[in-house]
Amino acid sequence: MAPSISVVITCYREGDLLLEAVESVRQQTQPPLEIVVVNDASPDDRTNQVCRQLETKPDITLVWQAQNGGPSIARNAGFAAAQGEVLVPLDADDLLPPNALAHIQQAFAEHPDAAFIYGSYLCQRYPNDPRLVKAVPISLNSLLRARRFSLSTNWTLIGTAPLRKSLWEAVGHSDPELGAEDLHDLEFWLRAMALPCGYYGISDVIYIWRKYLGSNSRKVSPMSWYRVAQKHFEVYRQNGLEYRAHELLLLGSKWSNQTAEIRRHRRALWHCIAHGHFQFSSLIALAIPAGLFQPMAQLAKRLR
Protein backbone atom coordinates (compact mmCIF):
# COMPACT_ATOMS: atom_id res chain seq x y z
CA MET A 1 0.00 0.00 0.00
CA ALA A 2 1.32 3.43 -0.95
CA PRO A 3 2.17 5.57 2.11
CA SER A 4 0.75 9.06 2.61
CA ILE A 5 3.17 11.95 2.08
CA SER A 6 3.61 15.29 3.83
CA VAL A 7 5.86 17.87 2.19
CA VAL A 8 7.49 20.03 4.88
CA ILE A 9 8.84 23.43 3.81
CA THR A 10 10.88 25.51 6.24
CA CYS A 11 11.32 29.18 5.47
CA TYR A 12 13.21 32.17 6.80
CA ARG A 13 13.20 35.38 4.76
CA GLU A 14 12.64 33.60 1.42
CA GLY A 15 9.67 35.77 0.41
CA ASP A 16 8.44 35.00 -3.10
CA LEU A 17 10.79 32.01 -3.39
CA LEU A 18 8.47 30.27 -0.92
CA LEU A 19 5.61 30.67 -3.40
CA GLU A 20 7.73 29.00 -6.08
CA ALA A 21 8.50 26.08 -3.76
CA VAL A 22 4.81 25.63 -2.87
CA GLU A 23 3.79 25.84 -6.53
CA SER A 24 6.30 23.10 -7.42
CA VAL A 25 4.50 20.86 -4.91
CA ARG A 26 1.07 21.76 -6.26
CA GLN A 27 2.23 20.83 -9.77
CA GLN A 28 3.04 17.25 -8.74
CA THR A 29 1.52 14.44 -10.78
CA GLN A 30 0.93 12.69 -7.43
CA PRO A 31 -0.32 15.27 -4.91
CA PRO A 32 0.71 14.96 -1.25
CA LEU A 33 -1.59 14.51 1.71
CA GLU A 34 -0.62 18.01 2.84
CA ILE A 35 1.93 20.80 2.62
CA VAL A 36 3.33 21.96 5.96
CA VAL A 37 5.04 25.36 5.93
CA VAL A 38 7.12 26.46 8.92
CA ASN A 39 7.83 30.18 9.23
CA ASP A 40 10.91 30.34 11.46
CA ALA A 41 10.06 33.82 12.79
CA SER A 42 11.01 35.60 9.56
CA PRO A 43 11.59 39.31 10.27
CA ASP A 44 10.71 40.59 6.77
CA ASP A 45 7.25 41.74 5.75
CA ARG A 46 7.15 39.90 2.41
CA THR A 47 7.74 36.42 3.84
CA ASN A 48 5.10 36.98 6.52
CA GLN A 49 2.67 38.32 3.92
CA VAL A 50 3.21 35.22 1.76
CA CYS A 51 2.68 32.96 4.78
CA ARG A 52 -0.57 34.70 5.75
CA GLN A 53 -1.73 34.24 2.16
CA LEU A 54 -0.81 30.53 2.19
CA GLU A 55 -2.46 29.99 5.58
CA THR A 56 -5.88 30.52 4.00
CA LYS A 57 -5.40 27.60 1.59
CA PRO A 58 -7.01 24.25 2.53
CA ASP A 59 -4.01 22.16 1.43
CA ILE A 60 -1.52 24.02 3.64
CA THR A 61 -0.79 23.83 7.36
CA LEU A 62 1.14 26.88 8.57
CA VAL A 63 3.36 26.60 11.63
CA TRP A 64 4.44 29.95 13.08
CA GLN A 65 7.57 29.89 15.25
CA ALA A 66 7.51 32.47 18.05
CA GLN A 67 11.26 33.03 17.73
CA ASN A 68 13.93 32.10 15.24
CA GLY A 69 15.37 28.76 16.29
CA GLY A 70 17.39 27.80 13.24
CA PRO A 71 16.95 25.04 10.66
CA SER A 72 16.93 22.05 13.04
CA ILE A 73 14.23 23.43 15.33
CA ALA A 74 12.14 24.60 12.36
CA ARG A 75 12.30 21.20 10.68
CA ASN A 76 11.46 19.43 13.93
CA ALA A 77 8.37 21.64 14.29
CA GLY A 78 7.26 20.85 10.74
CA PHE A 79 7.84 17.12 11.11
CA ALA A 80 5.93 17.08 14.41
CA ALA A 81 2.94 18.81 12.79
CA ALA A 82 2.92 16.56 9.70
CA GLN A 83 0.28 13.83 9.43
CA GLY A 84 1.82 11.78 6.62
CA GLU A 85 3.67 8.49 7.00
CA VAL A 86 6.46 9.81 4.77
CA LEU A 87 8.07 13.23 5.21
CA VAL A 88 9.55 15.07 2.23
CA PRO A 89 11.68 18.04 3.37
CA LEU A 90 11.88 20.97 0.97
CA ASP A 91 13.91 24.12 1.54
CA ALA A 92 11.94 27.25 0.64
CA ASP A 93 14.45 28.29 -2.03
CA ASP A 94 14.42 24.88 -3.76
CA LEU A 95 11.92 23.00 -5.94
CA LEU A 96 10.47 19.54 -6.56
CA PRO A 97 10.38 18.28 -10.17
CA PRO A 98 6.83 17.35 -11.31
CA ASN A 99 7.14 13.57 -10.83
CA ALA A 100 9.11 13.66 -7.58
CA LEU A 101 6.34 12.58 -5.21
CA ALA A 102 5.15 9.84 -7.57
CA HIS A 103 8.67 8.37 -7.65
CA ILE A 104 9.05 8.74 -3.88
CA GLN A 105 5.72 7.12 -3.09
CA GLN A 106 6.39 4.23 -5.46
CA ALA A 107 9.83 3.61 -3.96
CA PHE A 108 8.47 3.43 -0.41
CA ALA A 109 5.58 1.19 -1.52
CA GLU A 110 7.96 -1.23 -3.26
CA HIS A 111 10.48 -1.19 -0.39
CA PRO A 112 8.51 -1.28 2.88
CA ASP A 113 11.72 -1.99 4.81
CA ALA A 114 13.28 1.32 3.69
CA ALA A 115 13.29 3.98 6.40
CA PHE A 116 14.45 6.54 3.86
CA ILE A 117 15.09 6.73 0.16
CA TYR A 118 17.43 8.90 -1.86
CA GLY A 119 17.51 9.69 -5.54
CA SER A 120 19.19 11.70 -8.24
CA TYR A 121 18.82 15.47 -8.12
CA LEU A 122 19.56 18.59 -10.12
CA CYS A 123 22.13 20.97 -8.64
CA GLN A 124 21.99 24.55 -9.92
CA ARG A 125 25.20 26.33 -9.03
CA TYR A 126 24.13 29.16 -11.35
CA PRO A 127 20.70 30.21 -12.71
CA ASN A 128 19.51 28.09 -15.66
CA ASP A 129 22.47 25.74 -15.25
CA PRO A 130 21.10 22.45 -13.84
CA ARG A 131 23.67 19.70 -13.35
CA LEU A 132 22.45 16.15 -12.87
CA VAL A 133 23.83 14.45 -9.76
CA LYS A 134 23.11 10.75 -10.14
CA ALA A 135 22.27 8.59 -7.16
CA VAL A 136 25.04 6.11 -6.41
CA PRO A 137 25.23 3.22 -3.91
CA ILE A 138 26.05 4.49 -0.43
CA SER A 139 27.08 3.18 2.97
CA LEU A 140 28.00 5.01 6.14
CA ASN A 141 31.62 3.95 5.63
CA SER A 142 31.76 5.33 2.08
CA LEU A 143 30.06 8.60 3.05
CA LEU A 144 32.44 9.35 5.93
CA ARG A 145 35.64 8.71 3.96
CA ALA A 146 37.64 11.43 2.26
CA ARG A 147 37.33 11.86 -1.48
CA ARG A 148 40.21 10.44 -3.46
CA PHE A 149 43.26 12.76 -3.43
CA SER A 150 41.32 15.34 -1.42
CA LEU A 151 40.64 16.50 2.13
CA SER A 152 36.90 16.80 1.40
CA THR A 153 34.53 14.23 2.84
CA ASN A 154 32.76 11.96 0.35
CA TRP A 155 29.29 12.79 1.73
CA THR A 156 26.85 12.57 -1.19
CA LEU A 157 23.53 12.07 0.62
CA ILE A 158 21.45 15.23 0.16
CA GLY A 159 20.04 16.60 3.41
CA THR A 160 16.46 16.65 2.13
CA ALA A 161 16.14 12.90 1.51
CA PRO A 162 12.54 11.66 2.04
CA LEU A 163 12.05 9.58 5.19
CA ARG A 164 9.42 7.80 7.19
CA LYS A 165 8.19 9.79 10.17
CA SER A 166 8.95 6.75 12.32
CA LEU A 167 12.66 7.12 11.47
CA TRP A 168 12.69 10.76 12.56
CA GLU A 169 11.13 9.68 15.86
CA ALA A 170 13.58 6.78 16.27
CA VAL A 171 16.64 8.97 15.63
CA GLY A 172 15.47 11.45 18.23
CA HIS A 173 14.76 14.38 15.90
CA SER A 174 17.26 16.86 14.45
CA ASP A 175 19.67 18.20 17.07
CA PRO A 176 18.24 21.63 18.08
CA GLU A 177 21.71 22.82 19.10
CA LEU A 178 23.04 22.54 15.54
CA GLY A 179 22.75 25.20 12.85
CA ALA A 180 23.54 25.24 9.13
CA GLU A 181 27.23 25.81 9.83
CA ASP A 182 27.19 22.68 12.03
CA LEU A 183 26.10 20.32 9.23
CA HIS A 184 22.78 19.69 10.99
CA ASP A 185 21.34 17.68 8.07
CA LEU A 186 24.42 15.48 7.76
CA GLU A 187 24.55 14.91 11.51
CA PHE A 188 20.94 13.70 11.51
CA TRP A 189 21.59 11.24 8.68
CA LEU A 190 24.78 10.03 10.32
CA ARG A 191 22.79 9.14 13.44
CA ALA A 192 20.05 7.53 11.33
CA MET A 193 22.43 5.29 9.38
CA ALA A 194 24.30 4.37 12.56
CA LEU A 195 21.09 2.94 14.14
CA PRO A 196 21.22 1.18 11.60
CA CYS A 197 18.22 1.60 9.30
CA GLY A 198 17.15 0.38 5.87
CA TYR A 199 17.38 2.66 2.85
CA TYR A 200 17.06 2.48 -0.91
CA GLY A 201 18.39 4.55 -3.80
CA ILE A 202 16.48 5.34 -7.00
CA SER A 203 17.78 6.80 -10.25
CA ASP A 204 14.83 9.18 -10.72
CA VAL A 205 15.34 12.91 -10.18
CA ILE A 206 13.43 13.87 -7.03
CA TYR A 207 14.85 17.28 -6.05
CA ILE A 208 16.09 20.55 -7.53
CA TRP A 209 18.74 22.19 -5.36
CA ARG A 210 19.10 25.85 -6.30
CA LYS A 211 22.47 26.14 -4.64
CA TYR A 212 23.13 29.62 -6.02
CA LEU A 213 20.28 31.00 -3.89
CA GLY A 214 21.50 29.62 -0.56
CA SER A 215 24.38 30.57 1.69
CA ASN A 216 24.50 27.62 4.09
CA SER A 217 27.22 25.76 2.19
CA ARG A 218 29.47 28.82 2.49
CA LYS A 219 29.15 28.71 6.30
CA VAL A 220 30.72 25.27 6.58
CA SER A 221 34.35 25.26 7.74
CA PRO A 222 36.84 22.67 9.05
CA MET A 223 35.41 23.43 12.50
CA SER A 224 32.04 22.09 11.30
CA TRP A 225 33.65 18.73 10.56
CA TYR A 226 35.71 18.96 13.76
CA ARG A 227 32.47 19.06 15.77
CA VAL A 228 30.99 16.12 13.83
CA ALA A 229 34.12 13.99 14.37
CA GLN A 230 34.29 14.96 18.03
CA LYS A 231 30.62 14.14 18.68
CA HIS A 232 30.59 10.90 16.68
CA PHE A 233 34.13 9.61 17.13
CA GLU A 234 32.79 6.19 18.13
CA VAL A 235 30.80 5.91 14.88
CA TYR A 236 33.96 6.59 12.89
CA ARG A 237 35.84 3.99 14.95
CA GLN A 238 33.12 1.35 14.50
CA ASN A 239 33.29 1.88 10.74
CA GLY A 240 37.07 1.42 10.62
CA LEU A 241 37.62 5.15 10.12
CA GLU A 242 39.31 6.21 13.35
CA TYR A 243 42.10 7.71 11.25
CA ARG A 244 39.56 9.86 9.37
CA ALA A 245 38.17 11.21 12.64
CA HIS A 246 41.70 12.16 13.71
CA GLU A 247 42.25 13.85 10.32
CA LEU A 248 39.19 16.04 10.85
CA LEU A 249 40.10 16.76 14.46
CA LEU A 250 43.65 17.66 13.41
CA LEU A 251 42.42 19.97 10.64
CA GLY A 252 39.97 21.68 12.99
CA SER A 253 42.74 22.13 15.55
CA LYS A 254 44.98 23.70 12.90
CA TRP A 255 42.13 25.95 11.75
CA SER A 256 41.66 27.25 15.30
CA ASN A 257 45.37 27.15 16.23
CA GLN A 258 44.94 24.83 19.23
CA THR A 259 48.57 23.83 19.73
CA ALA A 260 48.00 21.07 22.29
CA GLU A 261 45.17 19.57 20.23
CA ILE A 262 47.32 19.67 17.09
CA ARG A 263 50.04 17.66 18.83
CA ARG A 264 47.53 15.16 20.25
CA HIS A 265 45.74 14.42 16.99
CA ARG A 266 48.98 14.41 15.01
CA ARG A 267 50.34 11.66 17.28
CA ALA A 268 47.07 9.72 17.05
CA LEU A 269 47.04 9.96 13.25
CA TRP A 270 50.66 8.80 12.99
CA HIS A 271 49.69 5.84 15.20
CA CYS A 272 46.90 4.92 12.76
CA ILE A 273 49.28 5.22 9.80
CA ALA A 274 51.84 2.99 11.54
CA HIS A 275 49.16 0.29 11.72
CA GLY A 276 48.25 0.68 8.04
CA HIS A 277 45.04 2.65 8.52
CA PHE A 278 45.10 5.82 6.42
CA GLN A 279 44.21 7.48 3.11
CA PHE A 280 46.05 10.02 1.00
CA SER A 281 44.10 12.68 2.91
CA SER A 282 45.87 11.60 6.11
CA LEU A 283 49.21 12.67 4.67
CA ILE A 284 47.78 15.99 3.47
CA ALA A 285 46.29 16.70 6.91
CA LEU A 286 49.68 16.10 8.52
CA ALA A 287 51.62 18.15 5.95
CA ILE A 288 49.56 21.37 5.88
CA PRO A 289 51.14 24.03 8.14
CA ALA A 290 48.73 25.32 10.78
CA GLY A 291 49.45 28.95 9.94
CA LEU A 292 48.68 28.50 6.24
CA PHE A 293 45.67 26.20 6.49
CA GLN A 294 42.99 28.82 7.03
CA PRO A 295 43.99 31.15 4.14
CA MET A 296 44.51 28.14 1.83
CA ALA A 297 41.06 26.73 2.67
CA GLN A 298 39.36 30.10 2.21
CA LEU A 299 41.05 30.57 -1.17
CA ALA A 300 39.97 27.09 -2.29
CA LYS A 301 36.36 27.84 -1.27
CA ARG A 302 36.33 31.06 -3.32
CA LEU A 303 37.66 29.20 -6.37
CA ARG A 304 35.00 26.46 -6.23
Image (cartoon, rainbow, N blue to C red):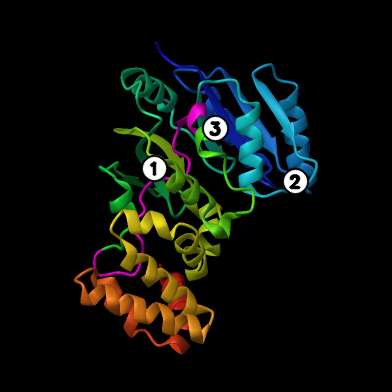
Quarter occupied by residue 192: top left
Q: Is residue 222 left or right of residue 239?
A: right
The numbered mark, 3 or 1, whose residue comes first in the sequence reads: 3
The picture places residue 298, in percent across and down from the top left corner, at 48, 76
- Does 153 appear in magenta? yes
Tell me where the magenta segment starts and ends, as one range.
148-167
Residue 205 at x, y percent in the picture: 35, 35
Dominant secondary structure (helix, strand or loop) of the stretch shown in magenta: loop
Secondary structure beneath label 1: helix
- Which residue is rendered at x = 59% and y = 48% of the image? 175
Q: Residues within 10 Å of mark 1 (few under 14, many from 20)?
A: some
First in sequence, mark 2 or 1: give its number: 2
Q: Which residue is mark 2?
A: 42
Q: Look at 62% across and 38% down and name the residue there.
A: 76
Left or right: where 191 falls relative to 61: left
**Are circles 3 and 1 on residues that touch, CB within 8 Å?**
no
Query: Could you tell me residue 250's position as x and y percent?
Result: 42, 76
Q: Which residue is the site of mark 3?
A: 169
How far is disc 3 from disc 2 in space, using C-alphas? 27 Å
- Helix, strand, or loop for circle 2? loop
Q: Crowdedness of circle 3 by 10 Å Cα count: few (<14), some, many (20+)?
A: few
Secondary structure of the residue carrying tag 3 is helix
- Where the N terminus falls, by quadrant? top left
Instruction: Please tell me which residue is depicted at 48% across the width and 40% down the height of the picture.
Output: 160
Query: Pointer 1: what residue?
Result: 193
211, 218: nearer the viewer: 218
Which part of the image, by quadrant, shows the C terminus? Answer: bottom left
Q: Residues within 10 Å of mark 2 (few under 14, many from 20)?
A: many
Q: Using residue 41 as the reference point, say whether residue 201 is left or right of it.
A: left
